[in-house]
Amino acid sequence: MTSSSAAGRPDRPGPWQWPVDPARYDTAPLLRVAEKDAIIGLGIGNLRRLARHDPAARGWQQVRRLLRPLDDAAAALEALPTSHRRRAMLDATAVVLLRCAETGRSYWAWTEEEWAALLGQNQHGFRKAAPGWADDAVRPYLAAHAFLLGGFTAFYRLGSFSRLTLAWRVFGRDRVNGEIGRIRSVLAGWGYRLGRDDDQLLPMVACQMLLLNRSPHLEDLSTGLFERVRRERLLPAARGNTLHAMQRAVRLDPGASRSQAYQPCAVVLAEARANHNAADGPVLCAQTVGRAGVVSSEWRSSLGAWRRYVALAVVGRGTGRGMACRIIPVW
């Protein structure tokens, strides 16, 4: 394993680092004639590195600049070392090398469209695009290559695809589960069903966001990314409520956003009628918490439609604005 992949292993403590640094490799976009000839000459058995493959075959040296980053990316994944998983990882690498020979271009130069065409919109699409020996277990590892080597994040194009499993393998299971747990703890405090451990919607949406952001850390999420997901419809419409809840939880988790200047200090329940005007929001906070606050335009636009609220008192942190209040719906 190279130092590049070791530094970014998902099971290492501390902040996650991108495990494959393109600057360490020859990323020339066009395939050299010798490379294409070597891929063809090695044959399927060698490319798949089956039990009887020839590790001393001359063609390996010719494809080294293509093979090394693929192997480094595979080594950086968190996966139990079972024979079945190792076979799928090796076959994913073989699929990529064969496609390089077909296109005459290295994977460093592949577009989002090209990665998506190889991965397929679903398993059926993948089986049509990939060689017959590449079974369904190969596709997730191919997606990891697309993410780590091609910067591919268009997972919304892949149909029924486990974003959670991919995030576990790329970022690390403990790290991903820990970040999802932070969101759950906030949502559970508000009474959301998404806060329960048996909920499956939040992990899917959260992992989609982490993968899109190319980081497993909630601190790296931005309002712009959430807006982009809505604007470009990168999640099914049915996941809109989950996305909204996640965004609110991230903003109000005291450690979840470097740009968020608020820290929760108290939660109290307040009753309000459906016809409350937006201007009554700060008054409600003042009555409940004892100090006037601020209601953002985001809450103001929907205030009149809510019948029950949670008033969350938050203390300004480094803003000079003192205490502020937000009105949060009880779903």
Image (cartoon, rainbow, N blue to C red):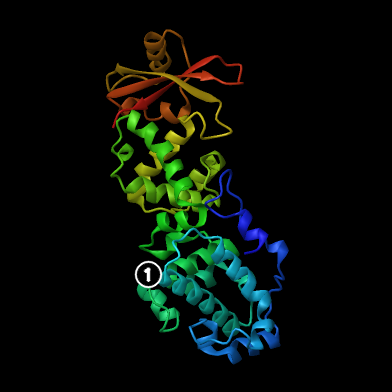
Q: Nearer the viewer, residue 173 or 155?
A: 173
Residue 318 appearing in the image:
yes
x, y percentage for residue 34?
A: 70, 87
* Relative horizontal placement of residue 17, taking residue 251 as reference (left or right): right
> Can the viewer see residue 230 in this picture?
no
Residue 71: which quarter of the image?
bottom right
> How far across and down, in percent of the image, does residue 226 sit?
48, 44
For label 1, the SS is: loop
The quadrant of the rendering that contains the C terminus is top left
Residue sitting farthest toward the bottom: 41
Q: Nearer the viewer, residue 284 or 151?
A: 151
Figure label count = 1
Position of residue 173 measured from the top left corner of the image (x, y, whole percent): 45, 51
Query: According to the image, label 1 marks what residue?
Result: 122
Compared to residue 35, the image places residue 327 above or below, namely above
On screen, residue 160 above or below 285: below
Q: Is residue 58 left or right of residue 331?
A: right
State whether residue 157 is above or below residue 230. below
In which quadrant will I find the N terminus?
Answer: bottom right
Q: Residue at x 55, y 52 (%)?
A: 214
**Amino acid residing under circle 1:** Asn
Q: Position of residue 99 (x, y in %)?
A: 55, 80
Would you identify the image quadrant in which residue 98 lies?
Answer: bottom right
Nearer to me, 155 or 51: 51
- The residue lying at 42 percent from left, 79 percent from top is 134
Q: Nearer the viewer, residue 323 or 256?
A: 256
Q: Residue at x 41, y 83 (%)?
A: 133
